[in-house]
Image (cartoon, grey):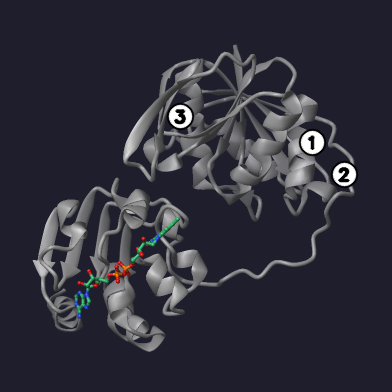
Amino acid sequence: MSILVIAEHEHGALKGATFNTVTAALACGSEVHVLVAGHNVGEAARQAAQIAGVTKVLHADAPQLDAQLAENVAAQVLAVAQGYSHILFPATAHGKNAAPRVAAKLDVAQISDITKVVSPDTFERPIYAGNAIATVQSADAVKVITVRTTAFDAAPATGGAASVESVAAVSDSGLSSFVGREVTKSDRPELTAAKIIVSGGRALGSAEKFNEVLTPLADKLGAALGASRAAVDAGYAPNDWQVGQTGKIVAPQLYIAAGISGAIQHLAGMKDSKVIVAINKDPEAPIFSVADYGLEADLFEAVPELVKSL
Ligand SMILES: Cc1cc2nc3c(=O)[nH]c(=O)nc-3n(C[C@H](O)[C@H](O)[C@H](O)COP(=O)(O)OP(=O)(O)OC[C@H]3O[C@@H](n4cnc5c(N)ncnc54)[C@H](O)[C@@H]3O)c2cc1C
């Protein structure tokens, strides 16, 4: 039984999500291969070959794979899919874009967002915004899976000595074309990879206050900034900061929620954080039910005080 992991990479280097996905793959079986598809991604392929537990790397390199368009990536996966019992993608924007295309073409049901491998055909996945865990068994010949990366430790980046095999790149599907990319530049860690996250909610009241109150705390802690959907919808914080069911799923070492009520849709994105600190002036706020440390206080006083004492 061979298992194929679809690598995620950026600027020629593997992204963290790939390492977590390899761990999930190793729980399905021992023959784990990684597909690195892109343009000028030789270095990423070499990195993949060093991941502990990986036995082979497939390297597809061509300009039409540069922009990682889902149509081309899915076609590339399908071109090498023969013989694999499992095909695993990280449950990231990229993975969630390509995986359903692969599952549909293989005429199998996708198994989404797994958090545990019970056995090679049985998986756990959260449903109802994380309020219940479904155990799903698949009878499909090929399991096309997306992996919730926060649920699996990263596989060690070294210790492997896999062979790297060049595979023919598929031609451009012609179904979509790359127009442009607007990338937010930030010195802060990426939200899903950050060890500490400072997150703000509707209580902040404006984008100016959001920045004025939370940025100094994030700076002191070297943290990423996050937000509730209410804060994003009100324009206090950019879209890609949203944590939750319809935002990003995070599990940092420390999550500080300031002025966030703790609606289930928000909790769905952060309740696996190792330590949760909540600052809220309402003692009944649901966020306190998941918090390891709760401070019933006005955030406009508590957060600056915290910054001062750090
Ligand atoms: C399908 C669907 C998907 C959703 N997806 C998401 C998602 O991905 N992420 C998400 O976050 N939400 C999501 N939501 C929205 C979610 O239901 C809540 O509406 C949202 O999380 C509320 O944001 P909030 O906690 O910032 O605001 P509120 O619920 O308004 O809470 C503000 C909190 O701030 C406290 N407060 C006020 N002033 C102060 C002060 N001065 N000091 C301290 N505390 C103060 C209040 O006591 C209150 O608890 C989704 C909803 C739906 C229906």
Q: CA distance from mark 2 to mark 3?
A: 31 Å
Give the label on residue 75, or none.
Answer: 1
**Label 3 environment density (alpha carbons within 10 Å; few <14, some 14–19, many ≥20):** many
Residue at image mark 3: 23
Q: Please state which amino acid type lies under the numbered disc 1.
A: Ala
* Lower position in the chain sequence, tag 3 or tag 1: 3
Give the label on residue 173, or none.
Answer: 2
The image shows residue 277, relative to residue 308, as above or below, that is: above
Along the horizontal axis of the image, is 102 left or right of 28? right
Residue 127, quarter of the rendered image: top left
- The picture places residue 66, in percent across and down from the top left corner, at 77, 52
For residue 207, say whether it is visible. Answer: yes
* Lower position in the chain sequence, tag 2 or tag 3: 3
Q: CA distance from mark 1 to mark 2?
A: 8 Å
The image shows residue 45, relative to residue 211, as above or below, that is: above
Assign the C terminus to one quadrant of the image: bottom left
Say what secondary structure mark 1 lies in.
Answer: helix
Residue at screen point 49% across, 46% down: 16
Residue extending furthest top?
1
Residue 142 or residue 6, whichever sits in front = 142
- The picture places residue 225, in percent across and down from the top left corner, at 38, 68
The image shows residue 79, relative to residue 119, as above or below, that is: below
Assign the N terminus to one quadrant of the image: top right
Say what secondary structure mark 3 lies in.
Answer: helix
